[in-house]
Image (tube, coloured by chain):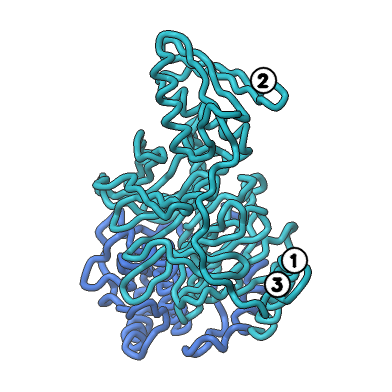
Chain colours: A cyan, B blue
Amino acid sequence: MTVLRLLFLTALLASSQQSVTAAGLPSWLKLPGRARKAAVELPEHKLRLGEFTGGTGTSAQKSLLEELTLSREFQLTEESPHYTVSGSSVGGRVTGKLVRHADGKLLFERTYAAPGLDENLRLLADDVIFTVTGKPGLATSRLVFVSDRSGTKQIYSCDVKGRDVQQLTREPEGAVSPSLSPEGGAVAYTAYKAGFPVVQILDLGQGWERTVTDTPGSNFGAAFSPDGERLALVMSFLGNPEIFVTDLNTNTAGCISDTVGAPSGPAWHPGGKQVIFSDDRGRGPQLYVAEVPEKSGMQSRLFLWRTGYKFCTDPEFSPSGKQVAFTTRTGNQTSVVLKDYPQGSNTVIQADNARHPSWSPNGRYLCYCQYGSLYIHDLRTSQRKLVLSGYGTISEPRWMR
Amino acid sequence: MTRRPLFSLLITGFLGTCLSACTQISSTFSEEETEVVFALGSREGFTSPLTAALKPACPAIEFSANSFSLNGSHKKRLHSLAADWPKTKPRYLVAGYAPPELSAGYSRSLSERRAQAVRQFLIENGVEAASLQTVGFGHDAVPSGPGNGVVVIYRQ
């Protein structure tokens, strides 16, 4: 059977290779080119920051400049810009408009009336980024994480700069293993209800919470599917832990892992048809990819995805689905590693006890924790920023997808 | 189980596929193969060590590194526990724990798997499946006693 699986995997890899190199030598014959330092690329879109009128206009313009500079999505320039953002601001309220120069079209004009000037400008900056690039901005995106600062493990959220920290759960016996829904409106997590692990969903907007699975044994590791309609999670009521995919509308669940080992950490492919997870079948945790059956009763195939490491946990697909970030362990040290999917080279992003990576929605950053602090790592510049530290011991960070 | 008709259906549905899977990948395991995997019964009436002070039924069963198979001394200890069981037929909660240096999700799964291995052995030695319940705490909770890569059997 293992041989059959290997064959499946080879077939999968072979088919993916063909699509990459349509002509010329097969890719396995080509020697890898010498690693060359990539030239610094300027962002493709040129944006002009226009005038902001009104009483708080000057400070609005200054804050917006800061947000847009930090986003690194634009060349902020006065010379032949593609777009101009301008507007007005009175008493913290902001009206912004974005004009495309190619045809002079007004792309949007919106008023932001949230309580704070800075929050309004973050919303405007994200709207500009989304309208121009089609990718979600980070200024309004949030991270969830677990911290033990209150004595028990509870789930908290913060923005990408580590500000505005909110405690989301107040479970007497603790709550762990959070995952944010695609729109960021709900968080799924494991709560120790009456001391037993149960998977729940908390709606952040309306405040209701709902128990998804309360089966005998353990329930944990919930991960929202890209459409937000399903959860992948670990349940052990069968007599050993297995990965299940549960449909939140019908409350049915199907097993996809097919193991007698210790599976954990499921994460979805952005296409919503595959789930990657870590599974220890007696020789340390390895990464497996399971197809998610579209209808119940359908057989799903399972592949072992070789990474070259003997101990891999907490995998997560990049938003493009072309890379996987995961945690490895050698000796007593953990590292965060990036690997191309379905095949390619490994890149160690951060060694020295870094663990549990999670991708930013635009795929440019990874967040992870290291010695109980939360970091954000820019994958293009390889620079990282300490986002939150000294806030209890931080673990299991997840970025809003 | 009447309260969860869905999962009782699932148990019957997936037990079959699970059993066939066990035989497929048996070669990866050095330990002897378990023939039947028993699904868990209802958790109703079981108390968690997080909410009450519970007495361990026997000394904690320590596992090394990330192993989840039972060795000779584990089996010896469990044998005597299983032999005593028919006298009073107590109910046991088998709780797994893992050391903090392992990743959080993996440690939960590993500790649950260890608890299931202990439960499986007890069932094979005559303890009724309905009197056993498992839970894997990973390193979210600290066991009472020495070592943190352990399985503790709590008397209910």
Question: Viewed as shown, does residue B24 lie left or right of B69?
Answer: right
Q: Amino acid at mark 3?
A: Leu
Q: What is the spatial separation of the Cα atoms under label 3 and label 1, in whole angstroms? A: 11 Å
* Label 3 crowd bin: few (<14), some (14–19), many (20+), radius 10 Å: few
Residue A19: mark in rendering: 1
Q: Tag 1's secondary structure?
A: helix
Of labels 1 and 2, earlier in sequence is 1
Q: Relative to residue A27, is residue A162 drawn left or right? A: left
Label 1 and label 2: CA atoms lie apart by 40 Å
- Which mark lies nearer to you, 2 or 3? 2
Residue in the foreground of this view, choosing between A59 and A5 = A59
**A67 or A342, which is in the foreground?**
A67
Q: Secondary structure at mark 2?
A: strand
**In the image as oriented, which residue stretches furthest toward the left?**
B146
Q: Report the residue at 57% width, 60% height from top.
A: A323
Residue A163 in sight in this render: yes
Binning the other alpha carbons within 10 Å of mark 1 as few (below 14), some (14 to 19) or many (20 upward) gives few
Residue A106 badge: 2
- The residue shown at (42%, 55%) is A382
Q: Circles 3 and 1: CB distance less than 8 Å?
A: no
User: What residue does disc 3 label?
Assistant: A12
Q: Residue at x 30, y 56 (%)?
A: B50
User: Which comes sooner in the sequence, label 2 or label 3?
Assistant: 3
Q: Residue A242: x and y, percent?
A: 55, 67
- Front residue of A320/A237: it is A320
Outermost residue, front direction? Answer: A79
Q: Amino acid at mark 1?
A: Ser
Residue A244 sits in which quadrant?
Answer: bottom right
Image quarter hosting the N terminus of chain A = bottom right
Q: Position of residue A384 (x, y in %)?
A: 37, 51
Task: Identify residue type, mark 2.
Answer: Leu
Q: Looking at the image, is B119 positioned above or below residue A70?
A: below
